[in-house]
Structures are given as structure tokens and as C-alpha cells.
């Protein structure tokens, strides 16, 4: 579908496709494909074009992600912005999509006045900080925990910070990558110890894993623990969560025979 | 409408993706699928690994009356999927049509069970994804019931999600659910 809004903005500024693409350091045919909706920009390109035409780059992601997916699928940005709670399993394939979704998540956290925690690598922290700075987003309520360093020490530092500033936060956003060492559980425990009222209704967590590295049998096990499943493009309800709370679960062929 | 199982009623056609883990459950599910088909007088095309099929023969098939055994048509999955060479999508789809055509020509109702196996090779994820999309169209067009079985230890979550887009139902050793990712292709 054509990005009519992008064409309108460009024309309102009396610019040609050639001029916009030159100033945004991209090929004109690529820009033309973006206008025609044949391709989606990465976050860097989105920011560059937005600067040239002076609009909020989130428009690109809102527009592309807000396309309501079929049936009961929930769009990622809608989910991030409106639900603001829930436990989500994210299996990513594209690093670029991963970063875009992480940024959207943090933006929704900031918008929601949440205390946000990102349990990730220093590299991702640097990339995310760069984008948030470009978007002029304050990161005062976003805490980074390097998953590859001494987590306990970092949690102590966060603990001191919370005590020092006597933070009164009522919403929480957690994003973690390859969470296997119980960091999230330790973090939650520490927040509770600080009398922060943290519970399912005010907590939004995304646990992410590389879909190309996780085996199918582990994926199925995880589907039973998370109510929401997310890919680079969509969010759906998990069919196996909580003994089929979301979906009807039927016995497999042989188990039906046994119940005859 | 045809009853897929005692609990789940579906259209005449159903494309079921089965991720198996335990060998015994796998055999039991295959046996139950065949048994249900025989009850309905469906012919069964079983594309299976020779070792597994031998086991099933000894345990179940050879105990069936001869007239029922005649409803079961075994295909060696290693040669069907060209296991020792390249996974050639179009060749496999052609073979699939070749298998089904004689039944369709005589309006004979059949169901299929295919245990998909392959050797490590370049672009296998893309090949399997494309293959299953084509297979979903075929299953839909032909109005048949078809199970595609994959060893869940052999595939990644990325491939699983792709396959869930081309199958309306998802089965584990113990359960069947509707695939939340299914995208109807026709």
C-alpha cells in the first residue's frame, strides 16, 4: 500500500524524490519504493528521511506496524502502546527489526512513565542510546544492565539509585535478551524489596531470543509459559499458554483414542 | 464437514503440522491417524522413514485384516524427499501430485502422513518454507487431510514459525491447537 502521508509531506515541502533521497543519503529508486510501500525503511533511514522532511520518524513504524494483522493478531506498536502489560516471548530473526521493536518498546515505556530496564549487551545499549538521543528522548528512567557482566553488582547500583532518589514508580517495563541466569527474577525481587508495588497488572516484559538459535522443542516449552508470542512482524496469543486459556487445546490423535 | 478427531471438526481439508518429541507418542499418533482413516474408509498415503514404518508394520499394520492393509500405501520418505541429495521442491510436489492423481481420478478419499526429513544443505529453511506453502495450496485445492511431521529437535524456532504460517493446525505429541500464525494461501 502506498505511503500517501509521506508523498503528501514531501509535496507540501515542494521537494522531489531526487532531492529527498540525496539529502537522506539513499538511492532515489529505494526512496521511491518506500513511497510506494514496496519496502520498509530501517530505523537509520527512517530517521534521515524524517530529518529532511521534518516529521517524527516513528510515523514510519506506526504506519507499518499498525497495519492490523489478520484475525486476532495484535500489531506490535498497538500492543506496546495500549496494553502496556503482559509477558511476551519475542523470537527475533532480523537484528534491524529487533532494534526497531526494542526502541518502540522503550518509547512506550517512556510514554507510560514506566521504569524501564534493558538487560542486554553494551553494544545494544550504545545503539539504543544513539537512537533515543536522535529522537531527543530522555533516558533518565531507562536502566541498562549488561547481561555479560557481574549482574549482582549492577543490581546493587540500581538498588542504591532507587533508594537515593526515592523513586515512586507505578509501571515497569523489562526487556531482556537470552535471559537464562535469573536476572529478571533478581531484579523483580530487588524492586519489591524497595516497596515498589510490582505485579502483573503494571508490568510489561519482553523476553527475547534469537529464533535461529532456539530449537523447536524449547519454543514449544516456552509457548506454555508466555501468553503472547512475538516475531519481528507480529504478536499473537500463545495457543498453549495456561492450559489453553487463549485457544482450545484438543488431545492429540492417540490420546483421543484412549478417551473413547 | 469431516470430523478430524473425536473433538475437532474441520472442513474436508486439513493441513496439520506435527512437531514430535517422544518416539512412542509419535508411533501412537501415526497409528491412531491410520486407524481413524480406516474407520472412515479413507486410503492412507504414509510417507515415512523405513525404520519407523517397519516398527509400525510389526506393531500394528501386519495385524490388520488384508483388506484394510490394502488401504495403506507406503512411500519411503528418504527417496521421496531425495534425502541424500538436494531437497528439490518442485520435484517433490510433482511426486505428490503423481501419488494422489490415481485416487483423485477415481474419486477415492484419502489422507496423507508425511514425515519430512532432509540432509543439511544450503537454504533448507527457505526451501522447506516454500515447499510447505505450495503443499498448503495443494491440500486446500485437493480437499484432503494431511499431516506433516517434523522432529522438533531438528528444527529451529525460526523455521517452526514459518511452518506455522502454512499449516492451519499445530500438533505436539499430546495436543492439537489452531496455529496462531496461519496465513491462508488461497
Image (cartoon, coloured by chain):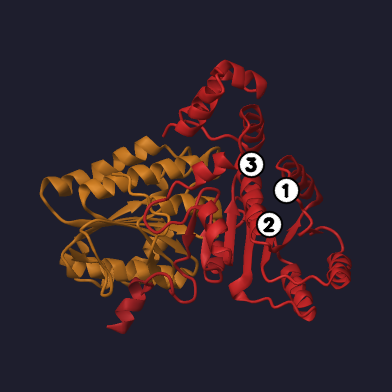
Question: Mark 2 and mark 1 in contact (Cβ < 8 Å)?
Answer: yes
Depth check, mark 2 against mark 3: the one in front is: 2
Q: Residue at x 42, y 68 (%)?
A: B26
In depth, the one of A142 and A11 nearer the eye is: A11
Chain A's colour is red
**Helix, strand or loop for disc 3:** helix
Tell me which chain the residue with mark 2 is part of.
Answer: A
What residue is pinned by disc 1? A137
Chain that is orange in the image:
B
Where A247 sits versus B100, above or below?
below
Nearer the N terminus, badge 1 or badge 2? Answer: 2
What residue is pinned by disc 2? A110
Question: Mark 3 and mark 2 in contact (Cβ < 8 Å)?
Answer: no
Q: Answer left or right for B57 relative to A51.
A: left
Tell me which chain the residue with mark 3 is part of.
Answer: A
Nearer the N terminus, badge 3 or badge 1? Answer: 3
Say the numbered circle drawn on residue A96.
Answer: 3
Q: Do marks 2 and 3 share a subunit?
A: yes
> From where the camera sits, is residue A23 visible?
yes
Amino acid at each position: 500500500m502506498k505511503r500517501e502521508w509521506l508523498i503528501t509531506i514531501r509535496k507540501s515541502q515542494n521537494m522531489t524524490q531526487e532531492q529527498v533521497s540525496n539529502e537522506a543519503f539513499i538511492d532515489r529508486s529505494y526512496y521511491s519504493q518506500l513511497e510506494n510501500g514496496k519496502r520498509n525503511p530501517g530505523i537509520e533511514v527512517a530517521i534521515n528521511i524524517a530529518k529532511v522532511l521534518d516529521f517524527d520518524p516513528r510515523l514510519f513504524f506506526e504506519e507499518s506496524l499498525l497495519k492490523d494483522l489478520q484475525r486476532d493478531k495484535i500489531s506490535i506498536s498497538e500492543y506496546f502502546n495500549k496494553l502496556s502489560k503482559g509477558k511476551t516471548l519475542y523470537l527475533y530473526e532480523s537484528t534491524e527489526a529487533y532494534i526497531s521493536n526494542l526502541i518502540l518498546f522503550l518509547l512506550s515505556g517512556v510514554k507510560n512513565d514506566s521504569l524501564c530496564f534493558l538487560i542486554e549487551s553494551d553494544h545494544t545499549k550504545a545503539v539504543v542510546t544513539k537512537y533515543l538521543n536522535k529522537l531527543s528522548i530522555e533516558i533518565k528512567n531507562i536502566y541498562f544492565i549488561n547481561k555479560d557482566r557481574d549482574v549482582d553488582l549492577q543490581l546493587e547500583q540500581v538498588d542504591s539509585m532507587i533508594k537515593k532518589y526515592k523513586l515512586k514508580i507505578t509501571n515497569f517495563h523489562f526487556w531482556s535478551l537470552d535471559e537464562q541466569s535469573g536476572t529478571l527474577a533478581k531484579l523483580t525481587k530487588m524492586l519489591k524489596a524497595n516497596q515498589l508495588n510490582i505485579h502483573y497488572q503494571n508490568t510489561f516484559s519482553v523476553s527475547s531470543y534469537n529464533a535461529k538459535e532456539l530449537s523447536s522443542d524449547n519454543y514449544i516449552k516456552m509457548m506454555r509459559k508466555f501468553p503472547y508470542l512475538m516475531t519481528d512482524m507480529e504478536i499473537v496469543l500463545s495457543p498453549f499458554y495456561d492450559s489453553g486459556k487463549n485457544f482450545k487445546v484438543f488431545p492429540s490423535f492417540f490420546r483421543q483414542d484412549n478417551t473413547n | 464437514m469431516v470430523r478430524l478427531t473425536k473433538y475437532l471438526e474441520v472442513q474436508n481439508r486439513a493441513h496439520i503440522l506435527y512437531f514430535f518429541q517422544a518416539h512412542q507418542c509419535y508411533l501412537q499418533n501415526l497409528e491412531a491417524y491410520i486407524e481413524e482413516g480406516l474407520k472412515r474408509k479413507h486410503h492412507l498415503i504414509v510417507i515415512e522413514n523405513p525404520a519407523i514404518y517397519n516398527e509400525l508394520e510389526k506393531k500394528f499394520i501386519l495385524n490388520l485384516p488384508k483388506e484394510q492393509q490394502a488401504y495403506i500405501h507406503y512411500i519411503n520418505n528418504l527417496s521421496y524427499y531425495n534425502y541424500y541429495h538436494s531437497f528439490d521442491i518442485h520435484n517433490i510436489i510433482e511426486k505428490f501430485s503423481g501419488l494422489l492423481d490415481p485416487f483423485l481420478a477415481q474419486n477415492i478419499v484419502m489422507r496423507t502422513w508425511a514425515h519430512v526429513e532432509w540432509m543439511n544443505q544450503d537454504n533448507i529453511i527457505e526451501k522447506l518454507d516454500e515447499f510447505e506453502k505450495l503443499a498448503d495450496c495443494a491440500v486446500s485445492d485437493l480437499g484432503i487431510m494431511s499431516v506433516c511431521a517434523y522432529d522438533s529437535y531438528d528444527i529451529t524456532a525460526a523455521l517452526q514459525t514459518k511452518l506455522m504460517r502454512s499449516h492451519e493446525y499445530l500438533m505436539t505429541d499430546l495436543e492439537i491447537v489452531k496455529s496462531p500464525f496461519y496465513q491462508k494461501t488461497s
